[in-house]
Image (spheres, grey):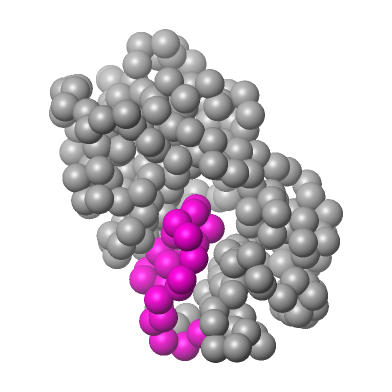
Amino acid sequence: MLRLLESKTKLPFPANPMAIEIEALIKTYGFNTSFVMFWIQELDGKITAAVSKVDSHVTVAAQKDFDSQELNEFLNVIGFSSLLGEKWVLDDLGFKISEKGIIMKYKPTMSSDEKNEPMTFECEPPYRKIYNLLKEPDAFGESISSYEDWLCDLSARVRNNCARVLFREREDKCISCGMFTFESDSGAVIGAVATHKDFRSKGYASDIVKELCTAAQKEKKDVFLMCREDKVSFYKKLEFKITGEFSLCQGVYNE
């Protein structure tokens, strides 16, 4: 049975990027906004799946015993422009996959005491400079929304301690960045890692990822990321291990 989630509930899922995203969105937006909604699926009193919808973007996290037929029918009813989930979940749901990639988890061989150039998390990072970097050709490699939409969502998560941003500047421009795009009490998802083409191969992105991982380690949080296969070797050098796959459906069902 699927029902609207209207109060904070512990989601009993193994740590993964989708579960962390849903928990971060609940903490950021709560249950009284018109453009963000949450649902859970329960079978015999056990939560087997959770769904978040921000505007028309849907994320799903599920247990192995979730009811895929019921969830498929439900997602067709609420509609979506994009759907994100673990590959096995979307395979069970039967949706046509438009993109897929790798899920990796930070698994260091030992706690790192390596000291890099100090970086601080700012409550109000230079959003426009960071956005301009992410929009640079070949800097990020993924499409992002308009500045207004991107800023509204990210800044809300930063203010509610559900995202953190690190960056490097040179000559008043952001040359490298990375962030916890979503952060819950138990985990964090690294994303938006980018470096301007003129500053590649200098270790800026590596240092930012290491700093994010160090911060999470101190707080005993699991760290995940989702990337394309061509980025796996880069993150393996930073002690990330492959733990699964994710899939994305786009433009298949719309409201």
Q: Nearer the viewer, residue 215 or 44?
A: 44
Horizontal and vertical percent position of residue 145: 58, 50
Assess whether residue 6 is covered by the magenta stretch: yes
Give the residues drawn in magenta, as a range.
3-28
Residue at horizontal 81 percent and vertical 59 percent from the top: 95
In this rendering, the answer to whether 26 lies above or below 131 is below
Q: Is residue 125 left or right of residue 77?
A: left
Q: Is residue 211 left or right of residue 149?
A: left
Horizontal and vertical percent position of residue 60: 61, 65
Q: Is residue 131 visible?
A: no
Q: Nearer the viewer, residue 250 or 127?
A: 250
Q: Quadrant of the N terminus?
A: bottom right
Residue at horizontal 39 percent and vertical 25 percent from the top: 238
Q: Is residue 225 visible?
A: yes
Q: Nearer the viewer, residue 18 or 208?
A: 18
Q: Nearer the viewer, residue 105 or 127?
A: 105
In this rendering, the answer to whether 25 lies above or below 128 is below
Residue at horizontal 72 percent and vertical 76 percent from the top: 67
Residue at horizontal 76 percent and vertical 79 percent from the top: 70
Q: Quadrant of the C terminus?
A: bottom right
Assess whether residue 80 is covered by the magenta stretch: no
Horizontal and vertical percent position of residue 111: 22, 32
Horizontal and vertical percent position of residue 199: 40, 14
Q: Is residue 73 left or right of residue 240?
A: right
